[in-house]
Amino acid sequence: MQKNRLTLFIFIALILGVIAGYLYNVYVINTINTRISNAEASIKNIDNSISGLKDSTAIDYQLLKTQRKLQVSLRNANDSLREDKLEGFTILSKIFLNLIKMIVGPLVFSTLVVGVAKVGDIKAVGRIGGKTLLWFLSATLISLLLGMLMVNFFEPGTAMHLTLPDSHLATGIKKSAISFKDFIDHVFPRSFFEAMTNNEILQIVVFSLFFGIATAAIGEKGEVVIKAMDAIAHVILKITGYVMQLAPLAVFGAITAIIAKQGLRILSTYAIFIGEFYFSLVLLWLLIVLAGFFVLRKRVFTLISYIKDAMLIAFGTSTSEAAYPKVLLELERYGCSNKIVSFVLPLGYSFNLDGSMMYMTFASLFLAQAYNIHMPFGHQLTMLLILMLTSKGIAGVPRASLVVIAGTIALFNIPEAGLALLLGIDPILDMGRSATNVLGNAIATAVVSKWEGELR
């Protein structure tokens, strides 16, 4: 009954957030948005005028530069004002997300140490890890391939006839060109405490594996550590229960802020892209559920009913990390072994972000279409493989998908400025990506549990 009430409250919060966001946009934010749009239009006109002047020492040139600086200041001032007006809503989701981040690191460490220590055998850990990575790599490849196929089928970049940003303009998104050396450096922690402070899930997993195996190796002396860690894990799970009561407020605040900032008008402008992307996500959901069905049979539908709250939380807050503690609880309630859940789920948050993977190929090729850049099939496959490598281990980076895309499209001479087309709607797209990531990781964990004979 309590579980159903939480689902209902989150769903009501979603609807109220859309209504409140729309009203706040119309009566409070719309005037500020108009000033920002006017300033951006003026900056674009000034840039065009500047590009037509050859003599940078001319009085007209200096005058235009002064006018541009004034318009940029005006835009930035209104942008800050808009953020201030939305602060009351964003703080609701900020509190919830901070509390989740407070929980995630200790929860991953304590549960994984207990899980690995109970497995005990290094060979068993390696076997479970091998099965897990096989599923993750297959899911990643399918997600990227589906995004590539769907964007080629729909061709939203040519169908939407959008006004393109100037190709030389910067977007402010830091490019991610992760080399193998950078990746290895990112995986292995310099300091356990630094990894915990920065919520680097992958690094926490690596240390926890070492700690758990070593705990099992010292025999009876390790029993004290296992009992202590098990008690700590239960305390943190109890805290999780308290924090989850705030989920509806967090969802309301996040949705209200998104709609209030952009308005419903952006949904009509990008209706084609958003509709086609979400249709592609539904296809991905069907593929993930179908793959789960082959292993779990009808129990896959029971699993979906267990994790629906977690998916709604991820959807409402636009981050799958917010749902992590809830997913862990529900997977154990569903019947997955504690040692499998605590091992597979944290790895999934770095290696198995199915929704984000699909978006990377979908968005990258959309930008190529928008700029009328022909991408042969061979180049698209090359992009897919590059994205498969560069996307691993960056889950903790804000706007991670856009960061990876920015680093990858540059290799194919697609203007980075095109990302400006996606910045406004990225939070809306991120909602669907985050919910998909939760679904993919939950089914992956249940499947590995079944393979290991650890599913009750």
Image (tube, grey):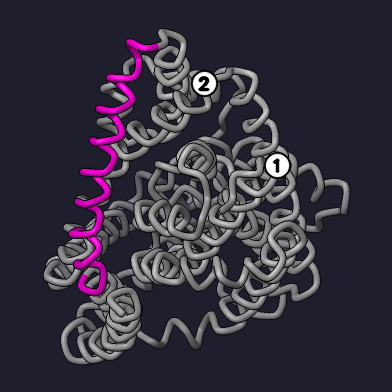
What residue sits right under mark 2 in the picture? 120
Quadrant showing the N terminus: bottom left
x 55%, y 66%: residue:
303
Q: In the rendered view, does 40 fall on the left or right side of 234?
A: right
Q: In the rendered view, does 84 fall on the left or right side of 293?
A: left
Disc 2 marks a residue whose amino acid type is: Gly
What residue sits right under mark 1 in the picture? 137
Residue 337, compared with residue 79, is above or below; it is above
Does residue 262 appear in this view?
no
**Which quarter of the figure has residue 316?**
bottom left
Q: Residues within 10 Å of mark 1 (few under 14, many from 20)?
A: some
Mark 1 vs mark 2, CA separation in Å: 26 Å
**Residue 245 within the magenta-colored segment of the rendering:** yes
- Give the residues drawn in magenta, as a range: 220-249
Does residue 175 appear in this view?
yes
Q: In the rendered view, does 177 fall on the left or right side of 41?
A: right
Residue 176, compared with residue 47, is above or below; it is above
Residue 216, compared with residue 294, is above or below; it is above
Disc 1 marks a residue whose amino acid type is: Leu
**Depth check: 408 or 187 in front?**
187
Query: Which tag is nearer the camera, tag 1 or tag 2?
Result: 2
- Tell me, yes or no, whether the two marked residues, 1 and 2, touch with CB atoms within 8 Å: no
x 35%, y 52%: residue:
325
x 27%, y 81%: residue:
9
